[in-house]
Amino acid sequence: LENICEVHRALRDPHQSLQNLTRAQMETAKRLGFSDAHIANLLTATSEDSVRSARTAFGLRPFVKRIDTLAGEFPAPTNYLYTTYNAATDDVTFGERGTMVLGSGVYRIGSSVEFDWCGVSAIRALRQLGHKTIMVNYNPETVSTDFDECDRLYFDELSYERVRDIYELEQSSGVIVSVGGQLPQNIALRLHQNEVNVLGTSPEMIDAAEDRHRFSQILDRIGVDQPAWKELVSVEDAEAFADSVGYPVLVRPSYVLSGAAMNVAHDASALREHLGLAAAVSPEHPVVVTKFIRGARELDIDAVAHEGSLVVHAVCEHVEDAGVHSGDASLILPPANLPADVMERVREIGAKVAKAFEISGPFNMQIIMQTVGEEVLLKVIECNLRASRSFPFVSKVTDTNFVDAATRAIVGAAVPKPQDLMKGKWPFTAIKVPQFSWTRLAGADPFLGVEMSSTGEVACFGKTPEEAYLISLLSTNAFRLPAPGKSIYIGLDDLTDARIAQKVAHHFSSLGYPILTDCEATRLIVGNDARVVKLDYTNRHALRDAVFDNNIDFVVNLAKRRPDGKLDANYCMRRMAVDFAIPLVNDQRCAEMLVDALDALPKGTSTAVYGSQPLNIETPVAVKTWREYLEMRNVD
């Protein structure tokens, strides 16, 4: 540690510059783990690329070593590799000119096993096409870091410096950046600008899609609608824009994954708070303020294009209203509420975007669907020129591997013929619901918003959307139906749809469940049969006793407004449900879908009891594709 600190102090010396840095000093710094970017930050008036040029001029580059998988007892000729400056020779020879695939890195909220599935699918497609493959990833939990999956596996960081090092050492034929989530996307443009052959969609177009101003200009040029928006210049300008379009507005930084620092502001004070957070998360890029459309539905479009022409696409409908992050939303495939003409308009938007951005590979769009009188408005809110976390879901449901098709489009070999998977009548519905880990995150608010919170997902097939949704919910961890005779505790706020609140309360009440609310205002909305029970959330022992005494076995919190603090009654209600292992429904559209599903279920002789009636709920059976599902159902 002292050696590292000494080098740090020497590089930070005001008299030290890149011009008078010796080869020995540079080599020592690299052996101690200093990146080019770190050295550039410590030296005065220099850049990472300048440090790289000086390093290569000294003849300094990392060596490639094998990871010894046999503890030195036997030779281990694996392709499990890493780079280091603490060596004098390479363990491998170069010259195969393999195709590099950049993985997704560490598992975290927003980037998890879905992107690893995409990376592995891309590697397998390349190998089928006869390409030598190189995977760069550093997460031992992934399948992509199984060294049997590729010809060469580099267990190394996904930084610009390291990727370029490996690219140059391997004399790679090209790099695929569109299957590993946001991390590879963030370095794509720099790689492209420094003579790295980025395969598929041009990084210039990737940057245009991330840059809100350029993205908006392109959409205007091709005649695709979008919500009103403005790039942030100052707080005063943002407030003036919000006043002109009307609250609520959505505040979002650029170049982030999983909606980091995205928030809906319902008034000026919330706007000022959210602007500061967004600027802190993405300081190098402008903050965008967009008109937030209430009561609209959101559509997810996953697609593959080749040289600007659409190859395949899938359209998923969100159960929740717009404003819930797509990673936290429940997705319906095929959509349950989209007429054929709207589906065709969505396909046309996808085709226009693919052509405008000259896409070769995967892309994903989010579209707001708003009904105004008889007219259905479609507005594009986001487009990512990469695979999305729903690619595995749509691939398995449609029995068409979207990443395989995307990989072939990226390298321009054996590209499948265009087909419209959304046409025709489907004999089933598939629904993907989120899995949360609220119990592992003390104090976290179980609230669905524009920033992603889920840590997993469950997808199920069903004969109808209602059946698929209910089976999916029952397959998630810690969700169950309320026991007969137990109480339902309901909370809401001023933004909740009163019709849905009344519908949910009536459903449970009609089956003999007592309805409890937390205040008189809520009781007046849900019905006179409800009883007000105020809980003391500050006293854990008293709270537990009150929950037990009032038989609270199911919590429905339909509040739409994010709370300001931990004293908010709706936050406390949601957190109580999680802490006491009580099933929680925290979205009004999900609550409505749940009661519709329960109403649609046939009453049978199953051992599952709901209300006073036994239910005929089929035990979920694991299947990989819709073909297996139909065979299980004996459907032609």
Image: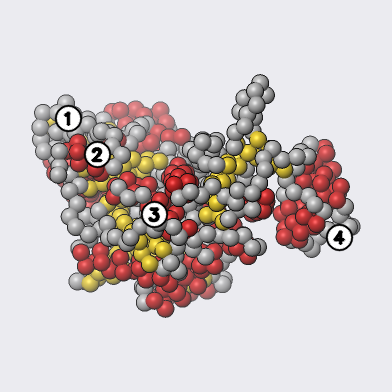
**Amino acid under disc 2:** Glu
Residue that appears at 46% across and 34% down: 440
Disc 3 marks which residue?
A: 405
Image position of 78 (left or right of 592): right
Q: Which mark is residue 19?
A: 4
Disc 2 marks which residue?
A: 628
Secondary structure type for disc 2: helix
Number of marks drawn: 4
Q: Nearer the viewer, residue 240 or 251?
A: 251
Q: Is residue 121 above or below residue 280?
A: above
Disc on the earlier residue, 4 or 2: 4
Residue that appears at 27% across and 57% down: 421
Image position of 83 (left or right of 208): right
Q: Nearer the viewer, residue 116 or 1?
A: 116
**Comparing labels 2 and 1, the label whose residue is closer to the camera:** 2
**Amino acid under disc 4:** Gln
Q: Which mark is residue 609?
A: 1
Where residue 370 appears, as percent x and y from the top left, is: 28, 66
Q: Which mark is residue 481?
A: none
**Comparing labels 4 and 3, the label whose residue is closer to the camera:** 3
Q: Nearer the viewer, residue 555 or 52?
A: 52
Disc on the earlier residue, 2 or 3: 3
